[in-house]
Amino acid sequence: MAKQLVKLEHVTYQYDDQETPALKDVSLEVQEGEWLAIVGHNGSGKSTLARILNGLLFPQHGSVMVCGHELNEESIWEIRKSIGMVFQNPDNQFVGTTVQDDVAFGLENGGIPPVEMRERVKDALSKVKMDQFLDQEPHHLSGGQKQRVAIAGILALRPAIIVLDEATSMLDPRGREEVFQTVLELKERENLTVLSITHDLEEAAKADRIIVMNRGKVYRSGTPEEVFRLAEELIRLGLDIPFPVKISKMLREKGIDLSRQFLSEEELVAELWTSHCSM
Ligand SMILES: Nc1ncnc2c1ncn2[C@@H]1O[C@H](COP(=O)(O)OP(=O)(O)O)[C@@H](O)[C@H]1O
Ligand SMILES: [Mg+2]
């Protein structure tokens, strides 16, 4: 059985100045090597969940386990080493004056010897394909490149899990694709566990599993195929379902019987050609 890296049990969190909790009785698990996408309307509690995971916030009820440690005041530093966070705005995350300084920053804080540090910085930057930019200053980089450097900064610390909170939402389509491909490769090659919080359901469609949040609760959890079967419900929850799912839904309404849920345009087109076109 796969190892459980994260386990939330009955987590409730309410901000001081709010009348209702941002998270209500949330339970979920993340397995080692898994890519879990979390989707949900604005204000559904996704970022609060990310903050709970790395101990920026402590839940009022329930428990959080990360890599076998229960999150509390004592374990928090250990836990932060195992969870790397990438946030939305690439410009708020750059702390170094050059690409390599930026990646080295977290390591300097961790008291790692200079020789090992240089190796780790180069290694992390080559994993995100930014090793040609060691001495570049941040303002010369595109948004996608900045986010890849942010990811390298995390990789250098060798965490077990990477949490991306809308990390691609401020990027143009090219930057989004760059970051997405980077994470995908890391997941496959380095067996990194990924928790991606995203508005982009096309991106979530490629994850191993999706959790749909609604008003602070886990509304559904399942494979992309299972979750997108709820097309109507997702639209009602304020989510924009992927284009091939929309088209499939319209085709079914017209009486065209599709054998399963298609999440990519290519697969849907292939199905229509082979099963529904007579020449
Ligand atoms: N720092 C904060 N102080 C008070 N309320 C907050 C804060 N951050 C978020 N909230 C509230 O908590 C709820 C969940 O927000 P959030 O976790 O940011 O959702 P999401 O990331 O899904 O958009 C919302 O009602 C939001 O207004
Ligand atoms: Mg958010």
Image (cartoon, grey):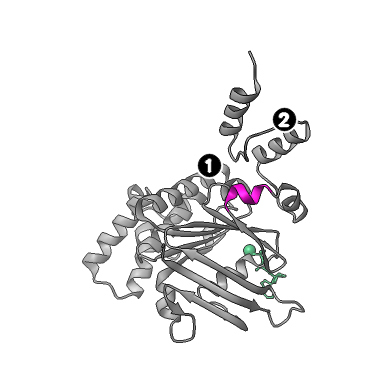
Instruction: Evaluate whether residue 269 shows in this view.
Output: yes
Report the side of 126 relative to 227 (left or right): left
Residue situated furthest top in the rendering: 279
Q: CA distance from mark 2 to mark 1?
A: 34 Å
Q: Amino acid at mark 1?
A: Arg
- Count how many numbered circles sit on residues in the image: 2
| Quadrant of the snapshot with the N terminus | bottom left
Residue at image position (70%, 83%) is: 16
- 63 or 124, nearer to the observer: 63
Compare residues 64 and 97 and report the one nearer the observer: 64
Mark 2 surroundings within 10 Å by alpha-carbon count, few (fewer than 14), some (14 through 19), many (20 or more) = few
Mark 2, residue position: 256
Ligand 1: give its quadrant: bottom right
Residue 113 in the image: x percent, y percent?
24, 71
**Magenta residue span:** 223-229
Q: Judging from the image, what secondary structure is the residue with disc 2 in?
A: loop
Q: Is residue 225 inside the magenta stretch?
A: yes
Pointer 1: what residue? Answer: 174
Q: Which residue appears at 70% of the width and 35% of the height?
A: 247
Q: Position of residue 93 (x, y in %)?
A: 49, 63
- The reply to whether the magenta stretch includes residue 273 is no
| Quarter of the C terminus within the rendering | top right
